Image: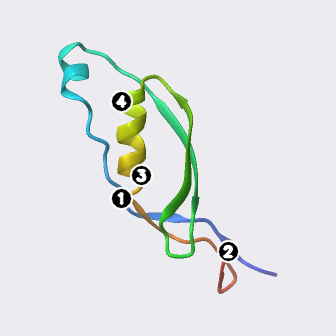
Amino acid sequence: MKTLSGPAPIILMTPRYPDDFIEKNLSGRVEMAFTIDSDGKPTDIRVVNDANAELAQEAVHTLTRNMYSPAYAGQKVV
């Protein structure tokens, strides 16, 4: 039986929240889908749902700086 392990975060950066949003007490949410490559880097990043283009841009930028341990099936990276 193969043991599966999902990707796990190693480095998680926090997106910069725009100053003008803070001043105006605005909030928003960005949903993204992405793949973790064999090196642990996010690829194929897609914004699935966003409240604001500025928030989405910052979220994508931040996600590209994150790092994950890749998923394994047994001892093979998948």
Quadrant of image for the N terminus: bottom right
Cβ atoms under marks 1 and 3 closer than 8 Å? yes
Which residue is at 69% across, 83% downward?
74
The local secondary structure at tag 2 comes to loop
Q: Is residue 24 placed above or below 9 in the rendered structure? A: above
User: N-terminal of the two: label 1 or label 2?
Assistant: 1
Q: Which marked residue is nearer to the observer: mark 1 or mark 2?
A: 1
What residue is disc 1 on? 65
Q: CA distance from mark 1 to mark 2?
A: 21 Å
Which residue is at 45% across, 28% downward?
29
* Label number found at residue 63: 3
Which residue is at 41% across, 56% downward?
64
User: N-terminal of the two: label 1 or label 4?
Assistant: 4
Please indicate whether residue 7 sits to the left or right of residue 76 in the image: left
Residue 67 spot, x, y in % from top left? 41, 65
Q: Nearer the viewer, residue 65 or 27?
A: 65
Q: CA distance from mark 3 to mark 2?
A: 20 Å
Residue 48 spot, x, y in % from top left? 59, 35
Q: CA distance from mark 1 to mark 4?
A: 17 Å
The local secondary structure at tag 4 comes to helix
Q: Residues within 10 Å of mark 4 (few under 14, many from 20)?
A: few
* Label number found at residue 54: 4
Q: CA distance from mark 1 to mark 3?
A: 5 Å
* Label number found at residue 78: 2
Cβ atoms under marks 3 and 2 closer than 8 Å? no
Quadrant of the rendered image containing residue 6: bottom right
Q: CA distance from mark 2 to mark 4?
A: 33 Å
Which amino acid, by three-letter code, is at mark 2?
Val
Q: CA distance from mark 3 to mark 4?
A: 14 Å
Please indicate whether residue 32 sits to the left or right of residue 54 in the image: right
